[in-house]
Image (tube, helix red, strand yellow):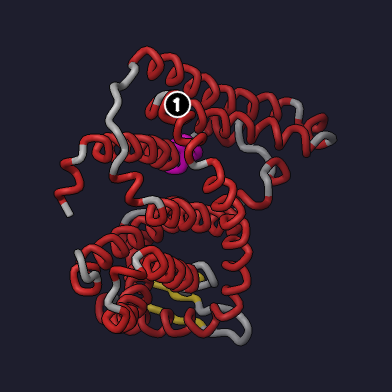
Amino acid sequence: MLKIFEKKGFKQFVVRAAIFFAILLVLQLGIFLFFSKTAFFVEHLAIPAEFYFKILYGLNKQNFLNSAIFVIVSFLLWRRKDILDFKPYKQDYKQTLIFGISAFLFFISHYAFKYWVKLNLEYALDHVTLITALKFSFNLFFIVFLGFAIFNREFIFNFIKKYFKDIIAFSILLILYYYLIWWFHESWFFFSVIIGKSLYFVFSIIFDDVVLLLAPGSGPTLGVGSFFVGISSVCSGIDSLLFFISLFIILVITNWNELNKKRMFLLFIPGIIGTYLLNIIRVFLLVLVGVKISPEFAVDVFHTNGGWILFLCYFIAFWHFGSKWVLKND
């Protein structure tokens, strides 16, 4: 697998993509962990939920993030041969500086606009749709200009031109997958109870003050000391199972001619079991972080980001080792 990084163009793409997503993740962590907890933020920048699109707020945001990650990974798998053959290009640092400054200005403008909304809340509430769209546009332009700063204009324009049809198709897939997640969530209760009982057994070995509350019609609540977490549909493992099944199907389609079909079918069994065990580990770590470090960090940061990071690491390792067994010409 390390041989693919000998291809300079692919290596450049991976490095730039890693920098792009690392910046977004670090900013998110910094805002959630520190900035949003300051008195200044609470007093001057915290605005009502009405000024957030529903698809990007609360549980909807988590499902949208899962859908976006699935679509990105699916595209990378679908076009993996093209991506491996990307041609190297020289970074234009003048563009990086100009677009980087532009991204920074839009990032600052986002919070300046929230400050204005807070000062003119009554007026803003009378024009919620317009204000929400404007607030969202600052975030959107920040991400766009950050992408231009890291990848540069020529690469992005050539990428859009070459894969325009793919971008449209995968955008539609994102919407369909988002609604598929909600439909799939109808089976969440069964899996939540299994996770709750499993973790209750594990934590009972480690701690003395462990509680599991089971109420008809609602998900189990697991408590360790003063930290309690409800194991709802998000923690049930449904998203991870759907994610794994979907990506597995894509792998079957994209590698159909090179696959040992019988071995691929057998590989699905440990893969799906491992996916569910991984979710139990994720919730275990969530509770442990809440007990040992910070409930706010566990709920605001780890809950949102821990799942997809763990899953991607797991899936990459799963296919790295599994492909050696199932691909005829690997």
The magenta segment: 31-36
Compared to residue 253, the image places residue 105 above or below, namely above
Between 197 and 245, the residue placed more toward the observer is 245
Q: Where is residue 138 in the image (x, y as percent from the top left)?
A: 60, 29
- Residue at (59, 60) in percent of width and height: 178
Q: Which amino acid does label 1 sit on?
A: Phe
Rendering quarter of residue 262: bottom left
Quadrant housing the C terminus: bottom left
What residue appears at the point 34 percent right and 58 percent down from the top-left corner? 312
Image-based side of 276 in relation to 12, left or right? right
Task: Kindly indicate the quadrant of the structure image that contains residue 204.
Answer: bottom left
Q: Where is residue 219 in the image (x, y as percent from the top left)?
A: 55, 78
Q: Tag 1's secondary structure? A: helix
Residue 175 in the image: state x and y as whole percent: 62, 56
Residue 296 visible from this viewpoint: no
Q: In this view, does 258 lie to the left or right of 247?
A: left
Q: 10 Å neighbourhood of mark 1: few (<14), some, or many (≥20)?
A: many
In the rendered view, tell whether residue 204 sits above or below residue 175.
Answer: below
The residue at which mark 1 appears reads as 148
